[in-house]
Image (cartoon, rainbow, N blue to C red):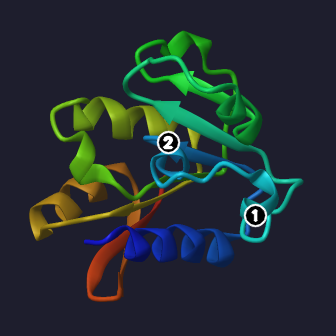
Amino acid sequence: MIERDLIEAYYYAIEQKEPTSVMDVGLFMQKIGMISRDFADYFIPDNVPLYGLDFEGKEYFPLYEKFYDKIFDFNEPDKVDITPELALFVNIKEFRGKYEPSRLYGWLKEHCDYLFTEYISEEQLDFLKKFGKTNPITIEGNGFVTVDMRD
């Protein structure tokens, strides 16, 4: 899947949910080189906090500390003090082997109302059903799913 399709899906989820806060799981916006919140505000309104969840726990350029309202390290869960409404995880293939899926999705269920993510197989879609009601969709021929994690 090319990044353009992932970008389209990312903003589609925001447009559909109109969330009050967003968690960018895996720092997708950083990965695609988004450095200006002014441009991102076209898709993510300025009054909607944008948080990052990083799997690697690395140092960031100061501009990303300004782009994201706050970046959290997945390996330090006790330091996460927010409850975003929508978690977006659209570049999952990049992170295979870097996190335990049950731990990640369990954490997201505890902290977020909705998850929007890509899925690459029916097996993965069935796995996501453990965490809430799923609503799969196709964007540009690729599978994505919204998981309602409120129940």
Residue 112 falls in which quadrant of the image?
top right
| Whether residue 67 is situated above or below residue 92 in the rendered picture | above
Give the amino acid type for the residue marked by disc 2 in the picture: Leu
Q: Residue 2 placed where, x, y %?
A: 30, 72
Q: Mark 2, residues whose alpha carbon is within 10 Å: few (<14), some, or many (≥20)? A: many
Q: Residue 58 placed where, x, y %?
A: 45, 18
Residue, far right: 47
Q: Mark 1, residues whose alpha carbon is within 10 Å: few (<14), some, or many (≥20)? A: few
Q: Nearer the viewer, mark 1 or mark 2?
A: 1
| Residue at disc 2, secondary structure | loop
Q: Which mark is residue 39?
A: 1
> Along the line of sight, which residue is nearer the eye, 126 or 50?
50
Give the amino acid type for the residue marked by disc 1 in the picture: Phe
> Along the line of sight, which residue is nearer the eye, 46 or 149?
46
The answer to whether one can see residue 151 in this image is: no
| Whether residue 63 is situated above or below residue 47 in the rendered picture | above
Q: Do tag 1 and tag 2 residues touch (Cβ < 8 Å)?
A: no
Q: Residue at x 34, y 88 (%)?
A: 140
Q: Which mark is residue 149?
A: none
Q: Residue at x 78, y 71 (%)?
A: 42
The answer to whether one can see residue 105 in this image is: yes
Q: Residue at x 73, y 69 (%)?
A: 18
Q: Is residue 13 left or right of residue 84?
A: left
Q: Which mark is residue 27?
A: 2
| Residue at disc 1, secondary structure | helix
